[in-house]
Amino acid sequence: MVELLTKPARLGTILAECEEVAFDLEFKRAKQWREAAPDRLLVGYLPIYIPREVLHAANALPVGIMGAGDRKQIIKGDAYYQSYICHLPRGVIEMALDSNLVGFDGFLFPAICDCIRNLSGMFKLAKKGKFTRYFDYPQNFTEHIGGPFFRELIQTVQEDMFKLNGVEVTPRAAQPCDHAVQP
């Protein structure tokens, strides 16, 4: 017999599951999603805009990497960055060096700060993922200046993913989708 839960109990169950997924430094749920089909990709990104709809259209799951927070002691990361640098890049490099990010196909490092720009180079040197891109954004979006720059950057990311899974991004495939929440 199925036990009926009260609304507060259901909410508590949902929140517990969300907390488990959000604070999992091994990214087990994302890795399970990736393993369910051979053409699926995991692409890690740091917290700022990336073209998630393009990743979804290429059958890739964009996975936000928010650092280790207070769940992981930073030791190796301090060898890459000074200890007074923000916790985010130090935690992310710590996670990469401790193999928390094994199974990710690629990484996009958005233009947040100089430390994150350097982190993209560190991932390339350490051969983390099958592709690593620093994702810079045009400051001028006029059609003849920023537009071509941004279009080329997105096409490069599409090509990176196509080389891995053979999924071509089309305008129809880039429509809003919900596969990211499906097991």
Image (cartoon, grey):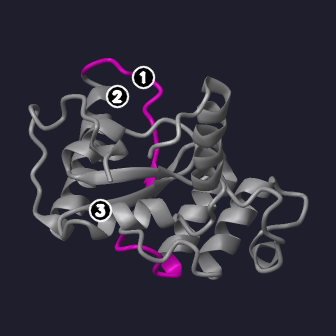
Question: Which of the two labelled residues, at mark 3 and mark 1, occupies the earlier sequence position?
Answer: 3
Image x and y of residue 63, in percent = 46, 52
Magenta stretch prevailing secondary structure: loop
Image x and y of residue 110, in percent = 51, 46
Image x and y of residue 182, in percent = 31, 47
Marks 2 and 3 sit apart, C-alpha to C-alpha, by: 28 Å
Q: Regarding mark 1 in the picture, which secondary structure is present there? A: loop
Q: Residues within 10 Å of mark 2 (few under 14, many from 20)?
A: some
Residue 39 is left or right of residue 113, and the answer is left
Q: Amino acid at mark 3?
A: Leu
Are the residues at dot 1 and dot 2 in contact (C-beta closer than 8 Å)?
Answer: yes
Q: Is residue 59 above or below residue 57?
A: below
Q: Is residue 60 visible?
A: yes
Q: Regarding mark 3 in the picture, which secondary structure is present there? A: strand
Q: Amino acid at mark 1?
A: Asn
Marks 1 and 2 sit apart, C-alpha to C-alpha, by: 5 Å
Q: Amino acid at mark 2?
A: Gly
Residue 34 is left or right of residue 18, and the answer is left
Image x and y of residue 9, in percent = 65, 34
Residue named by callout 1: 140
Q: Which residues are magenta?
A: 125-143
Q: Looking at the rendering, which quadrant does residue 70 occupy?
A: bottom right
Residue closest to the eye, 148 or 4: 4
Residue named by callout 3: 41
The answer to whether residue 64 is magenta is: no
Residue closest to the eye, 13 or 160: 13
Residue named by callout 2: 146
Q: Residue at x 55, y 43 (%)?
A: 111
